[in-house]
């Protein structure tokens, strides 16, 4: 554990392997129709893909409203997130196609203030309900789970670490790009971004090699 922001951090992020990510996406498709959540069999796999491909917090995804979705320019508008943060999060054409299929099936009004993933009485799916289903997904995907994880939030850590790895492999300037990652992730301070990246620093030889010249500046 380490003192961070006045509190102890006890967890070590779990970084999903590429095979595990593939299995999560594949197994998320096996959902049954639920009267309490009529669109669940379409919503659940789409939410999983958004978490993996966009690195959002689960609370941000579940509270997305239709008016915050821009399919013309491929982005989500995240409002009043953690730390009162607002930001624009772009997504790829594959996610756009999934949104189009979902919206065509559900016939939701994209100009409305309703939630994209509604539950009973138009309220959003709760994080607790989604977490229960996610734990079932881990089991179906053959990913062992303990009391400490892996967790939904580890998909966010995985996104950031693989993005850093991608930049390193492409020979890009990580010192210059990390502030962009901070903004994209919606972190209030750079230490938030650097903290969990440092926890996985030694797992990626290429990242360590590229970052060593500036590690004292980037990872305080």
Image (cartoon, rainbow, N blue to C red):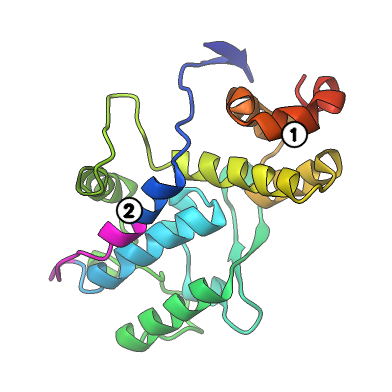
Q: Secondary structure at mark 1?
A: helix
Residue at 64%, 26% in the rendered image: 201
Residue at 37%, 88% in the rendered image: 104
The chief SS type of the magenta part is loop
The picture places residue 14, in percent across and down from the top left corner, at: 45, 32
Front residue of this view, candidates 11 and 165: 165
Numbered disc in front, either 1 or 2: 2
Q: Quadrant of residue 151?
A: top left
The picture places residue 165, in percent across and down from the top left corner, at: 66, 43
Give the magenta part as a residue range: 25-36
Does residue 186 appear anywhere in the picture? no
Residue topped by disc 2: 23
Front residue of this view, candidates 84 and 135: 135
Residue at 60%, 59% in the rendered image: 79
Q: Secondary structure at mark 2?
A: helix
**Magenta stretch encompasses residue 27:** yes
Report crowding for label 2: few under 14, some 14 to 19, many 20 or more residues within 10 A (C-alpha): some
Q: Quadrant of residue 142?
A: top left
Decide if residue 93 is on the left or right side of residue 10. right
Marks counted in the figure total 2
The picture places residue 185, in percent across and down from the top left corner, at: 64, 47
The answer to whether residue 153 is above or below residue 204 is: below
Between the residue at mark 1 and the residue at mark 2, the CA separation in whole angstroms equals 32 Å
Front residue of this view, candidates 148 and 83: 148
Front residue of this view, candidates 177 and 5: 177
Q: Quadrant of residue 73?
A: bottom right
Answer with mark 1 or mark 2, whichever residue precedes in sequence.
Answer: 2
The answer to whether residue 19 is above or below residue 197 is: below
Does residue 217 appear anywhere in the picture? yes
Indicate which disc residue 13 carries. none
Residue at 34%, 48% in the rendered image: 127
Residue topped by disc 1: 190
């Amino acid at each position: 554990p380490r003192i961070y922001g006045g509190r102890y951090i006890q967890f070590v992020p779990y970084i999903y392997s590429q095979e595990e990510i593939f299995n999560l996406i594949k197994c998320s498709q096996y959902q049954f129709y639920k009267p309490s959540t009529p669109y669940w069999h379409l919503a659940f796999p789409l939410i999983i893909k958004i978490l993996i491909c966009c690195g959002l917090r689960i609370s941000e995804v579940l509270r997305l409203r239709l008016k915050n979705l821009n399919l013309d320019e491929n982005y989500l508008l995240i409002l009043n997130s953690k730390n009162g943060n607002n930001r624009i999060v772009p997504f790829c054409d594959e996610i756009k196609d999934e949104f189009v299929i979902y919206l065509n099936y559900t016939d939701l009004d994209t100009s409305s203030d309703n939630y994209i993933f509604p539950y009973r009485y138009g309220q959003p799916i709760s994080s607790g309900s989604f977490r229960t289903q996610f734990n079932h997904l881990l089991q179906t995907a053959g990913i062992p789970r303990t009391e400490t994880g892996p967790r939904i939030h580890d998909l966010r850590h995985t996104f950031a670490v693989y993005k850093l790895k991608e930049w390193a492999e492409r020979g890009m300037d990580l010192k210059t790009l990390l502030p962009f990652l901070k903004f994209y992730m919606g972190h209030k301070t750079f230490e938030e971004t650097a903290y969990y990246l440092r926890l996985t620093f030694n797992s990626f030889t290429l990242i360590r090699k590229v970052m060593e010249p500036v590690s004292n500046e980037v990872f305080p």
